Image (cartoon, rainbow, N blue to C red):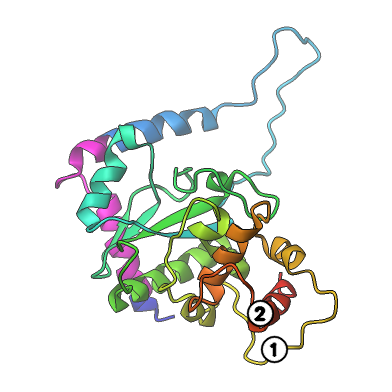
Amino acid sequence: MNKLLIAVFTCTVLLYACAVKGPYAPTNKVYKKQAKELTRPLQELPALSASNSALYQAATTNFNLRKPNYVIIHHTAQNSCEKTLQTFILPRTEVSAHYIICKDGTVHHMLNDYFRAWHAGVAKWGNTTDINSVSLGIELDNNGTEEFAESQITSLITLLNILKKTYNIPTPNFIGHSDIATSRKQDPSARFPWKRLADNGLGNWYDAVLDTVPAGFNHLQALRIIGYDVKDSTAAKIAFKRHFIQSDLSPALTGFDKQVINNLFRKY
């Protein structure tokens, strides 16, 4: 990737994140205070137990910060970036994300990547049930019924490449909100260009040539191996098709759908 592009993009994000003036100055101030309160305990040594005289402090020097391992992509289901920004700064909404990307490609960095945002809700991917603790949440300004703007997707791919490199996020771990919350969510919509992301190393996609599905193929077990929660099998199949098929969101699986599942589960 062009180093100048990365530098310009990073500066754009950081300028917003570090801004002390503007319409979000009051919440930026609260953010700084809350971040200070959260990080203060990190400087303390492991606590001694007053009831156990045999317990000693012995702080190791071999450590670093935990890092995100997944990126979850959402659409805002609102009609403007400004509306979403207002929603995410109100304490009563109890919802947030690390990044918001507007239709014009502007990136708003709302939360330090090491902090836990409240974007996934009740969700599951594979055996992971606390998705918020291991992921970054990215919201795209889109009401769910419209195409995604080219400038928005360009900024998204640039950001995702930076995050992938920074945190060494595995290629398969770029997924959507509907993938992890199959019964509750539909974002990003079937209009989202997952194949384009996969072509950039950001998520898996199926091969152009597909093998014949073997006899006795268990498509639900394969979906579970990919990561889907198949407790609600109908919701799991629709979520899979929203991500990988997109032209048909019925729960019925065609022969082609099963070929795609058979191809994909071998990649996970």
- Occupied quadrant, residue 147: bottom left
Magenta stretch? 6-29
Say left or right for 26 vs 167: left
Residue 231 pos. (x, y %): 68, 51
Looking at the rendered image, the quarter that the N terminus falls into is bottom left
Q: Secondary structure at mark 2?
A: helix
Camera-nearest residue between 165 and 153: 153
Q: Is residue 178 magenta?
A: no
Residue on which the image places disc 2: 260
- Magenta stretch: helix, strand or loop mostly: helix
Residue 172 pos. (x, y %): 62, 68
Tell me which residue sits at (59%, 56%) in the image: 69
Q: Secondary structure at mark 1?
A: loop
Residue 241 pos. (x, y %): 56, 71
- The residue type indicated by label 2 comes to Val
Asked if disc 2 and disc 1 are in contact, CB closer than 8 Å, the reply is: yes
Toward the left, the furthest residue is 22
Image position of 45 with respect to 70: above or below:
above
